[in-house]
Every structure is written in C-alpha cells, then in structure tokens.
Image (tube, rainbow, N blue to C red):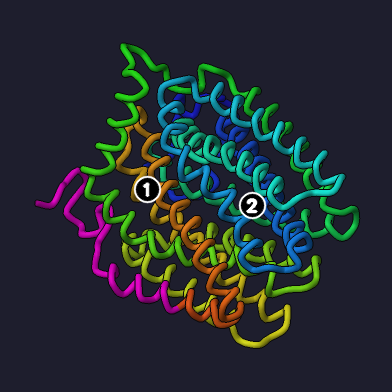
C-alpha cells in the first residue's frame, strides 16, 4: 500500500466515498493522530468546565469563561501559527504543537491534584488553547496535502469526522472518568492521548509531504500575504459572513450545557451524542453534497442547529436533550464541512495552513465573543431563556446572509470570479 497518496490515484474525481483517503498510510496515520489530539482537547475542555462548575459554585459566567479561555488564544495565535505551518515542515510543526499540549496536560494533571484556584485553571486552559491554535490549521492543512486533489472533498469531510470523532470519544471518556476517578484522571488521559498522537505523526515519512522548494518569504511577509489572499478572495469573504453568527451562537451549547445537567454521566453522554450526530452526518454528506449547493447546505445546517438549541431551552428530561444534541451535532457537521470545503477548494498548497488559520479565527472569534455574551446573559436571565435568545440570534443572522452564495454554487464554473 503506497504511503504517498500522490503516487497513485485510480479513483475518478467524482468518487465521493468519504473514507477513500484512508487507504493511504500517511494520510491514515495523520488522521488517527488528529482524532486522538482533538479528542484530548475536548476532554480537557469538559474536565475544566466540570471542575470550574464546582470551584465557582455553578456561576454561569465563570463556567463560560473556560470556553473563552480555550478559544481566545486560538483567535489570537492561529494566524501566526498557520503562517509557520506554511513556512516550516508541517510534520515537524505538528510534533512541536503536540509536545506543547502534552506539557500543558501534565501541568493540569498535577495542579488538579491539589487545591485549584479558578484563576490558575483559566491560565492553564489558556495555555492549552495556544496548542490548539497550532494543531487546528496544522492537521487541516496536512490532511489536505496528504490527499489527492481529486479527493479533497473526502479529505475535508474526514477532517470534520476527526473533529467529531474526538468530540464523541473525548467528552464520553471525560464524563466517565469524572465519576469513576475524578477530574485529575481526565487530564492524565489527555496527556496519554497527546503522546499517542505524537508517535503517530512521527511515523509519517517526511517525503509524504510536498517539497517546499525555492525561496521562502519572511514570516511577516508570509503572514500579511495570507491575510491579503483571504481578504481579496470573494469565496472566503462570503463564507466568513455566512458562518460568523453561527459560531457566535453555536458556542452557547458548549458554554451552557454544564448548567443544563446535574449528572456527570449525562454530561458526557450528551456530548458524545452531539459528536455521534456529526459522525452520522459524515455518512450522508457526500451524497448530500451532490444534490445541494454549498450555500443551501449552510442554510439548512444553520437553521436546524438553531431550532435544536431553541428546543433545548424547553423543559424536558435528559433523554430529550440527548436526542436534540444528536440533531444539533449533525447540523454542526453540515455547516463546518460546507464552509471548510468552500475555502479549501480555493487554497493552493502554499497558502493552505494560513487560509485555514483565518477560517479558524472566524470560528474562534465567534466562540470567544459568544462565551462571554451568553455567560453574562445567563447570569442575568437564566440558562433556558438564554438558549432561546441564542436560537433567535442564530436565525436572525441566517436571515441576513441567506442570499449570499459561496464557492461555485451558481454553476458558472470553476475559477470564475464575479465582478
């Protein structure tokens, strides 16, 4: 079996089977590493959120600040990190990032064994967010580079699957570990997951990645060049406008779910079903993508996600909430996959990490603002009323941007720029 997916490609460009790139050893190793690393990040977030709930006496703003602390460094650092990812060897870059995340997990493990002050918990969560800023564009770019260009849609879909597989495994394990062994065990498990991801990335041969020949721009020149490319690309601008309000509101689930449930088992199970819904979306996404334009996919995904959030605000038991989280997870997959695919189609390999970094900063900017906004609102009017406000805001953003077409939805052919 060839390790380099560029060596052979017996599949037609129209082959939409989402699992096809996993036939290649290099892509498969990087993808499994992404599952471990992203799962560990979700475990950290769940463990930190649950720990903060106890430390703060269930203060909605303090619990929401955990999400802000993990998202803010991504917003601040992901573009510089994406620039480095385009300038240096991507394999080595991912190894650096995973090493940093392992160190932060070790520190969280040791600190959680004693008397933790909320400020220190937020500080270490912020440090872990810096590692997240490095691996998110790094794995997205590496996966696209290790896949055939004709399999880009499958590679993008599989990257979303990795994100959501991590969302299933991470919170589910975290919820069980909180009950069985306590929060320190959650952080210790993340340390093990990051080390496994490091070993998998290290197993990918260096020559599986594209050779970066010729002169390279300086860091500042490369950073500004990536920002200019995204700013002048009409596809990127439209995608950013379509998803900005969605991300602002989607974080409401992350920030408020710890306050909706009182049982750690259901907390983990709820997150697991959110991820299961996203994985289920991956099985239907290729066929779904052939029948609907990307802009229509965004509209449906955002609308369904908002409706699920609104229904979560209604009185109901844990089973009903779990079913709604399943639907919300599938809608999340559709939105993120359609947005990433629209952007990835436009990006050359030399700009791939920077482009995905800018997409990530749109996401994390919404997460930071949303965590602070909805945490403050929940403190004032309560969790259930806040979820209703989140759903209404998401639908309002959808109504304002629904007519914006993205990528090549208008059928005018690849490469065309409307005037």
Asked if 236 appears above or below 331 in the picture, the reply is above
Which residue position is annotated with label 2?
165
Give the percent coordinates (x, y) of residue 350. Answer: 35, 27
Helix, strand or loop status at disc 2: helix
Q: Quadrant of residue 197?
A: top right
Identity of the residue drawn at 57% across and 61% down: 278
Answer with left or right where residue 79 lies relative to residue 295: right
Q: Tell me residue 155's x, y (percent).
A: 48, 43
Q: Which residue is depicted at the point 51% across and 17% down?
A: 207
| Foreground pick, 151 / 191 | 191
Query: What is the span of residues highlighted in magenta in the rendered image?
Result: 392-419
Q: Nearer the viewer, residue 110 or 176?
A: 110
Task: Indicate whether residue 169 is drawn in magenta.
Answer: no
- Mark 2 or mark 1: whose residue is earlier in sequence: 1
Is residue 307 toward the left or the right of residue 39 in the image?
left
x and y, in percent, of residue 368 in the image: 50, 55
Q: Are marks 2 and 1 in contact (CB under 8 Å)?
A: no
Looking at the image, which residue sits at the far top? 214
The residue lying toward the viewer, choosing from 322 and 358, is: 358
**Which quadrant holds the N terminus?**
top right
Q: Residue furthest bottom?
A: 315
* Most frequent secondary structure within the magenta stretch: loop
* Residue drawn at x 70%, y 27% as measured from the top left: 199
Q: Give yes or no for residue 411 being in the magenta stretch.
A: yes
Q: Which residue is mark 1?
A: 14
Category of crowding for the residue at label 2, using alpha-carbon neighbours closer than 10 angstroms: few (below 14), some (14–19), many (at least 20)? many
Give x and y (percent) for residue 83: 40, 29
* Looking at the image, residue 120 lies above or below residue 247: above
Which of the 4 quarters of the picture holds residue 247? Answer: bottom left
* Count of numbered badges drawn on the protein: 2
The residue that appears at 44% across and 53% down in the rendered structure is 365
């Amino acid at each position: 079996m060839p390790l380099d997916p560029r060596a052979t490609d017996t599949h037609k460009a129209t082959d939409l089977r989402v699992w096809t790139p996993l036939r290649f050893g290099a892509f498969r190793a990087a993808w499994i590493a992404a599952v471990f690393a992203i799962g560990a990040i979700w475990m950290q977030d769940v463990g930190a959120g649950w720990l903060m709930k106890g430390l703060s006496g269930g203060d909605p703003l303090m619990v929401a600040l955990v999400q802000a602390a993990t998202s803010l460094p991504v917003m601040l650092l992901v573009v510089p990190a994406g620039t480095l990812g385009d300038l240096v060897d991507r394999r080595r870059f991912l190894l650096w990032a995973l090493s940093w995340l392992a160190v932060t997990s070790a520190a969280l493990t040791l600190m959680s064994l004693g008397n933790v002050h909320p400020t220190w918990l937020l500080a270490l969560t912020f440090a872990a967010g810096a590692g997240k800023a490095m691996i998110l564009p790094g794995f997205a770019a590496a996966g696209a580079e290790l896949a055939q260009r004709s399999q880009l849609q499958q590679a993008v879909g599989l990257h979303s699957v990795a994100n959501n597989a991590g969302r299933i495994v991470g919170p589910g394990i975290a919820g069980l570990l909180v009950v069985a062994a306590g929060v320190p065990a959650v952080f210790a498990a993340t340390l093990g997951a990051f080390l496994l991801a490091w070993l998998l990335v290290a197993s990918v041969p260096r020559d599986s990645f594209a050779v970066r020949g010729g002169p390279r721009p300086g860091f500042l020149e490369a950073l500004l060049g990536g920002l200019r490319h995204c700013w002048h690309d009409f596809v990127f601008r439209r995608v950013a406008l379509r998803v900005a309000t969605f991300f602002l509101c989607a974080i409401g689930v992350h920030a408020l779910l710890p306050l909706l449930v009182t049982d750690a088992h259901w907390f983990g199970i709820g997150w697991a079903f959110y991820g299961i819904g996203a994985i289920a979306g991956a099985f239907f996404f290729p066929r779904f993508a052939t029948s609907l334009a990307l802009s229509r996919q965004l509209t449906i995904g955002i609308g369904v996600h908002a409706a699920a959030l609104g229904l979560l605000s209604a009185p109901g038991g844990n089973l009903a909430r779990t079913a709604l989280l399943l639907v919300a997870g599938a809608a999340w997959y559709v939105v993120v996959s359609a947005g990433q695919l629209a952007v990835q189609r436009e990006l050359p390999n030399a700009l791939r990490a920077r482009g995905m970094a800018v997409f990530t900063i749109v996401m994390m900017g919404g997460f930071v603002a949303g965590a602070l906004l909805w945490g403050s609102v929940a403190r004032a009017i309560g969790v259930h009323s806040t979820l209703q406000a989140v759903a209404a805001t998401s639908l309002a953003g959808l109504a304002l941007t629904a007519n914006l077409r993205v990528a090549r939805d208008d059928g005018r052919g690849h490469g065309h720029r409307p005037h």
